[in-house]
Amino acid sequence: MQISFLKDLATLRDPRSKFTFVNYLKSRNRLVAFTNLSTFLPLREEYNDYMSWCASHFEQDVQYGQETISISPTENPNGPIRSWQVVSRNVDTNEISTVTAKNVVVAIGGKPRIPPAFSTAELECGVVHSSLYSIAVPRILTDTNKAYNLAVIGGGQSSAEIFNDLQSRYPNSYTTLFTGASALKPSDDSPFVNEVFDPERVETFYNLPTESRQKTIWSDKATNYGVVRPELLDRMYENMYHQRLHQPDQSKWQHRIVAWREVVGVEKCSDRRLRLQLKNTSNGETSMSDSSFDLIMLGTGYERNGHEKLLQPTRHLLQDNRYAVERNYRLMFRKDAVADSCGIWLQGCCEDSHGVGRATPAMHTARG
């Protein structure tokens, strides 16, 4: 993980809550063992189990396997909107159902960002987004001893972790990481910079002029976008150096990092492998990759605009015809269009108004 376990689902709000990460460790009989690690950063696998453990306490209140299709107002000819119709589809049976609610929280997370070069259906079997890594890769690459040829696209934490993990899962495989940047860059999690994730900073950020907000977001990018934790970078560079020690010719390395390369096209080969068309971001020249790949992993991030499609039926009610939110994340509607006792709140897609920490665990406990 890239964040302290103290910024879990409860601690910053109520350290005595039973839903803290520390209490989870105690319930799993791992508290002392975790303490011996002397770290604030749990494994992703462990934090995923913590989240599942928390969710298990609310199974009676959750309907799983339901994909929300739309959220629309319950029209009221005699006054403002007082409720919403939430339409969903059962992913197993395709059955459509509708519930009525006065208040709705839209927290659907990010949608995988797929570069244009990979947006064709015929490539689906050989291209996987990082969000599906732990599920899809073992199903596709079934032989852990086989010498697969694997590519990772991206220069952030997810790409680096996947590049590193593939080498352990498939020790005989060849892995290549392509990044359009000049080099992999470290994340800045120094104490002063980390204050951008403090809940108190939201108030200051929200009250800034629009132009100042944009400048602040840009300056804070190094905390969370396209960067890698320094410890992982050190480990990766050590692995690269070990290869250099035995083989000066980088083209012959088993594991390579290729900078200044953006994928602009993909070619499907006769053996079902994929070859990449690469653009040199330093001079604009394009060329085909030397190798073809059994699998391409996309560490290309997420888009945070999925709420716009869900809320399309409400657009005529919006203030200024845009999905702007108040300080408490409540969607802004035209005056008198929606009753005060009724509303929609957005979570995880308010960076423009609430800053880069809007979707991080650090904010979950103090939202409001």
Image (tube, helix red, strand yellow):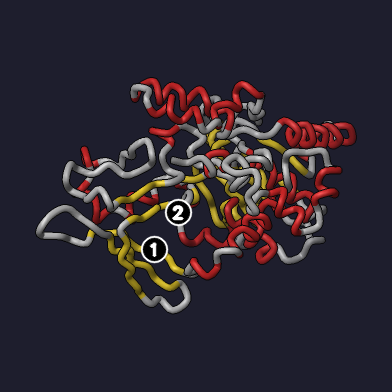
Can the viewer see residue 208? yes
Q: Residue 266: horizontal and vertical position, in percent?
A: 53, 50
Q: Which amino acid type is shown beneath numbered disc 1?
A: Thr
Does residue 340 appear to the left or right of 347 in the view shown?
left
- Judged left or right of residue 4, residue 237 is right
Give residue 234's quadrant in the image: top right
In this view, the residue in front, 290 or 341, is 341
| Residue at the front extreme of this rendering | 16
**Disc 1 designates what residue?**
68
Seen at 89% across and 35% down, the residue is 246
Spatial separation of the CA atoms under disc 1 and disc 2? 9 Å
- The answer to which of 63 and 116 lies nearer the viewer is 63
| Residue linked to disc 2 | 108
Q: Quadrant of residue 128?
A: bottom right
Pinpoint residue 316: horizontal percent, then vertical percent: 19, 49
Residue 177 in view of the camera: no
